[in-house]
Image (cartoon, rainbow, N blue to C red):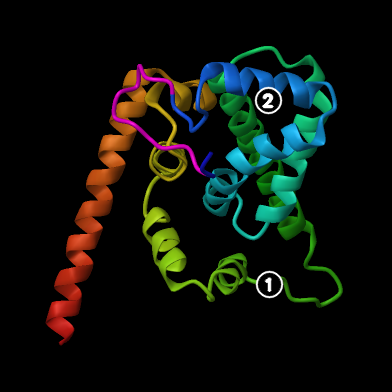
């Protein structure tokens, strides 16, 4: 079993990297019964794409939000009822909600922090410092920052995480058609920015 689900252009196909539906069902049932190894298999399956998703949705708080997501999953796991796609949708819906919660919390902190002459750190600079060690990630985040929030969210789930149109639509509460339009416009915008950046570098040289 690999660590990351593989995206497919056919949204009718079952995504994921389990050998069979039965394998996932057995693993899920064992995890629900308290089997730590089974839960570890679920964690290894979705944690890497979860971190990639949160790098965009909750920059600066990736580990904290991820911990909250898995805590929610652990608490709700015994009552969960669904298949592989339902489980994946549940995890990333939870991630989206927790990321929104952290963003609201962050906004409140920025609003009330300037007391007693203390300077509030620039959130942009703080986020940038967190990705300085990875130039490629920093460049990707810069590009994604040029999209609207809706476009950025859809591209993250569709392209970075590898969810289908239907799964993405469920998580962001939009129609399949709206998700396709947002993703198409976002990718077109990114392509335009990439072309513009290439031209700018060409002029500089």
Give coordinates of residue 149: x percent, y percent: 46, 43
The picture quadrant where one finds residue 130 is bottom right
Name which residue lies at 18% across and 70% down.
Answer: 198
Q: What is the number of callouts on the image?
A: 2
Nearer-N-terminus badge (1/2): 2
Tell which of 99 and 63 is nearer to you: 63
The spot of residue 58 in percent (x, y) is 61, 51
Please identify, in this view, whether the residue under mark 1 or under mark 2 is nearer the observer.
2
* Rendering quarter of residue 110: bottom right
What residue is drawn where x is 27% and y is 45%?
Answer: 187
Span of residues in magenta: 4-14
Please state the horizontal and vertical placement of residue 116, each as a whole percent of the image: 86, 74
Secondary structure at numbered mark 2: helix
For label 1, the residue is: 121
Q: Mark 2 — residue?
A: 27
Instruction: State the residue lying farthest toward the bottom.
Output: 205
Q: Determine whether, in the image, residue 43 is placed left or right of residue 168.
A: right
The answer to whether mark 1 and mark 2 are in CB contact below 8 A is no
């Amino acid at each position: 079993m690999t660590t990351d689900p593989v995206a497919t252009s056919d949204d009718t196909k079952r995504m994921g990297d389990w050998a069979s539906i039965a394998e996932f069902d057995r693993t899920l049932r064992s995890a629900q019964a308290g089997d730590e190894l089974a839960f570890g298999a679920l964690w290894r399956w979705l944690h890497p794409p979860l971190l990639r998703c949160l790098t965009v949705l909750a920059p600066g708080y990736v580990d904290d939000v991820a911990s909250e997501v898995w805590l929610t999953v652990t608490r709700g796991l015994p009552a969960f009822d669904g298949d592989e796609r339902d489980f994946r949708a549940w995890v990333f819906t939870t991630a989206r909600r927790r990321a929104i919660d952290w963003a609201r919390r962050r906004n409140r902190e920025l609003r009330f922090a300037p007391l007693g002459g203390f300077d509030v750190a620039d959130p942009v600079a703080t986020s940038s410092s967190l990705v300085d060690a990875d130039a490629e990630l920093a460049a990707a985040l810069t590009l994604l920052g040029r999209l609207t929030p809706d476009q950025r969210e859809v591209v993250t789930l569709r392209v970075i995480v590898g969810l289908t149109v239907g799964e993405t639509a469920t998580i962001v509460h939009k129609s399949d058609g709206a998700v396709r339009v947002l993703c198409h416009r976002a990718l077109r915008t990114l392509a335009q920015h990439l072309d513009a950046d290439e031209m700018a570098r060409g002029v500089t040289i």
